[in-house]
Image: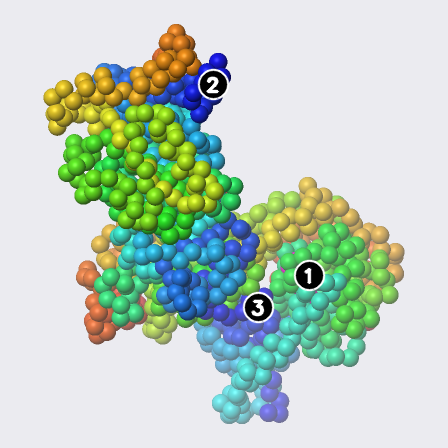
Amino acid sequence: MARRISLKTAVNEAIDQAMQLDPTVIMLGEDIVGGAGAPGEMDAWGGVLGVTKGLYAKHGDRLLDTPLSESAYVGAAIGAACCGMRPIAELMFIDFMGVCFDQIFNQAAKFRYMFGGKAETPVVIRCMVGAGFRAAAQHSQMLTPLFTHIPGLKVVCPSTPYDTKGLLMQSIRDNDPVIFCEHKNLYALEGDVPEAPYAIPFGEANVVREGRDVTIVTYGLMVHRSLEAAATLAKEGIDVEIVDLRTLSPLDIDTVLESVTRTGRLVCVDEASPRCNIATDIAAQVAMHAFKALKAQIEQVAPPHTPVPFSPTLEDLYIPSAAQIAQAVRRTTGGK
Amino acid sequence: MEGITPIVMPKWGLSMKEGKVVSWLVEEGTRITVGMPILEVETDKIANDVEAPDAGLLRRRVAQDGETLPVKALLGVMAETTVSDADIDAYVSAYETPAAGDETDADANAYQQIEVDGIRVRYARKGATAGTPVLFIHGFGGDLDNWLFNLDAVSERVPTLALDLPGHGQSELRLPGTSLAALAAFVVHFLDAVDEPRAHLVGHSMGGAIAAQVALDFPAKVASLTLIDSAGMGSDINAGYLEGFVQAQSRRELKPVLEQLFADPNLVSRQMIDELLKYKRLDGVASLLASLAGSLFSGGRQASTPVLQLAPDSLPVLVLWGREDRVISAGHAAHAPAGAGVHVFEQAGHMLQLERASEVNRLILALVAA
Amino acid sequence: MAANNPFPLSRDALLGCYRRMRTIREFEDRLHIDFGRGDIPGFVHLYAGEEAAAVGIMSHLGDGDRIASTHRGHGHCIAKGVDVGAMMKEIYGRKGGSCEGKGGSMHIADLSKGMMGANGILGAGAPLVCGAALAAKFRGKGEIAICFVGDGASNQGTFLESLNLAAIWNLPALFVVENNGYAESTSRDYATAVNSYVDRASGFGLPGVVVDGTDFFAVHEAAGEIIRRAREGGGPSLLECKMVRFHGHFEGDAQTYRANGELEDLRANHDCLKKLAAQLTSAGVASAAELADIDRQVLALIEQAVVDAKAAPLPSAADLLTDVYVKY
């Protein structure tokens, strides 16, 4: 039976069920339990935002709090993955990738290919992404394009609780390394989620709104901003289709091309910095493969090419808004 | 108001809250007869023609093409010429769409859970409480929403029940067995559990075979039998469809499979595919469906044909089929038991109860009334 | 014969170890020649001179024990039991290589033998070994994992972080510092602030042991004690093997950073293979003729490996695109 739960609960439930179903699933990260070795209670935090709270009570030492030592524990998760385990490493914020990037892009990403198809690295690296938390430049980035650039990695960024549970389950079951991006501003979002375990296959975009006039291609929090824009535009007689990519690697370019072929217009919305991001990739692929279908210039809505600012005034200006998205759509339609 | 008959947004299925008027199919001034398609409405699940529930002269098209309106919103007004335009204006402006709140609560109550033989199943109960109910039994891989256009209409006259078979819809993902006999026994135990000594069974596809098996094994439980594009009436069945349905994991894979269910493939909506995928992705569903298909329909052959074993004239039987059924050939309708009413509909496929809801509903009600 | 054997290994085991060390030496010396002829693409880092460390340690391991190697990984591979023919094909970039020609010298791996890969990124194996040891701990079968680093990579943050992680989790892990005195061309003494890796180990709360890495028996004994302790839940250790590198950092390295006569001295007076041969013959465990027979067999094995590698098919264009991701 489905019931309404938050995206944060969906993450917790997927890990819980995966651990129940498969004894090789373990989890490593900083403060994912909280209070390790301290005089007070265990499970003091359950993750920095409480996402994994309660899992320690159910699964005990299969959740390992780590030192602040990302290279070591992310690498350990990868090493354990090569040795029969299915580890989930929580990297708290995607911004911390810088200190353990080698383990991800030179080790995990390459083992299968570099070892001639004779190695599997079923590791999931969970991390929070995105701005809007007043967390400034080193805790707010949308670094998804760094990872889509690397062959061998899979990159997931869900927008709903349903997708979150199913895609995280698939990530854990998948035999390739997965960067699982959770938008911190979507944790409270509620939606219908089946209680039973299920997995959503990778590489299938979701058309979250069907429309005739313009295709918006996006993912993560920007799906919701785009839906807001579409509601506004509907009142103006502009019927917007929204494609939620869900997985950025593998990328379901077919669904994008099919949609643009129908609508003839494309607006790419990305919370990542505007150069060499997911939006520019989509724009390039559509220009290459569906140029003749285009009735107007392709538009991109992305933040400015700056670090994420701290002051709420500036951060609100930084994050792409529904109004900016609507405006970009209008530019492709000439008002209609 | 005296002499005025409203046409309102229908409610198709328990979850429908609003519908979009795609287009009117009749002009003002048309003499409407019962069952005449009068406008096309699209929901997030399916698009369908609204067929007139009442007869009359269409005086006013209130809803505009493209408008999205809540269930029971006023779509149009029928009245004889004796009613003035002013009275119609007054009626339209005074019309208030009944609040959805009560209705939604009632619908929430319509879904219930019950444990039968240790398996928790979801079912819906609607309509009057007295009288022998109609029990709707869906087909392989289906659920009670397959009766989207039937439950409400039929429950206006008689009590109705519909269940998600074990391992289907929102029932527990376990089977009481994979034989028709095991499934038939389960259905009877379900009737016992909901305190119904007898029912008019309406079965679609595999559900038809189960209903017929109930009639064979527990004749006292069955008041009548309506078999829609039913299994259990011949040996062949589309193996490609079954295999495709069991194996499809993505929208891209499932869509062409589901299109085989309808004469008009455009009836397969994104929502329909998404909801089926949500079911099919649940752990255990793929293997459960595979074992069920393996037991009942292995290699494109139906393992048993209970309908062919029914004694002639042993109970009232109605056999309905879509001529373009690509899953189970409409040719099987010829194997209907003696005395059965047989109707084969042109330009309809395997999902006849969705594709020709009004006619199916009328025929069911007529059989039940008889 | 067994009664006269003063060593802690059977005669068969000892001859097996000698054969492995000789195989490494012959493999590397042959690569030295073939690389010079331009037969081998890319670049190779040779393990010759260091054989006693790899074989001394690996003689305690089974296939369920994991190792992570370095850029100088051929010796670790051979000592861990990776097929020499497949290795040679790999280094020649051929189909049928350990990695189907997609990895090359620096990435030879064979998970079925517990060999988690040579590694082009210095120090990267240390966190992986923490994970392998963690997996072993969960499995609870007494398996261990061993990380090899050179003295150069011992300064990587990954290595130091891994010592800490292994220590706090009490992992069945062993960190081997192969100290050959040079990080590429830079001397160990310049690049590393402590003189002894025992000091570094104790800084992380780990026991540390220093051993003469050119003495097979010294390595074998020290590693044996540390490995036994790790298998029994006694936690991780660090083992420093002081050893010598007979070739340059990579092939083509003119090694002008060495002192005059340094290499000649190493080869003459610090050759671990000569030492082992002398120990075995003087103790009467094996005759010089027996060892020479092994040498001949090894030479033939390597010669055949090269012949087979050169005859093996090159990868096809289709192979370019396979094995990036799992096939569903």
Residue C314, percent from left and from top: 35, 22
Disc 3 to disc 2, how far (Cα)? 87 Å
SS at mark 2 in the image: helix
Do we see residue B62 in this rendering? yes
The answer to whether the residue labelled 3 contacts the one labelled 1, judged by CB atoms less than 8 Å apart, is no
Classified by dominant secondary structure, the portion drawn in magenta counts as: loop
Which one is closest to the eye, mark 3 or mark 2? 2
User: Was residue B165 drawn as part of the magenta stretch in this picture?
Assistant: yes
Residue B62 coordinates in the image, percent (x, y): 50, 81
Q: Residues within 10 Å of mark 2 (few under 14, many from 20)?
A: few
Q: Amino acid at mark 2?
A: Asp
Which residue bears the numbered disc 2? C12
As helix, strand or loop, the secondary structure at mark 1 comes to: loop
Mark 2 vs 1: CB contact within 8 A: no
User: Which residue is the extreme one toward the top?
Assistant: C289
Q: Is residue C137 left or right of residue A243?
A: right
The label shown at residue A270 is none
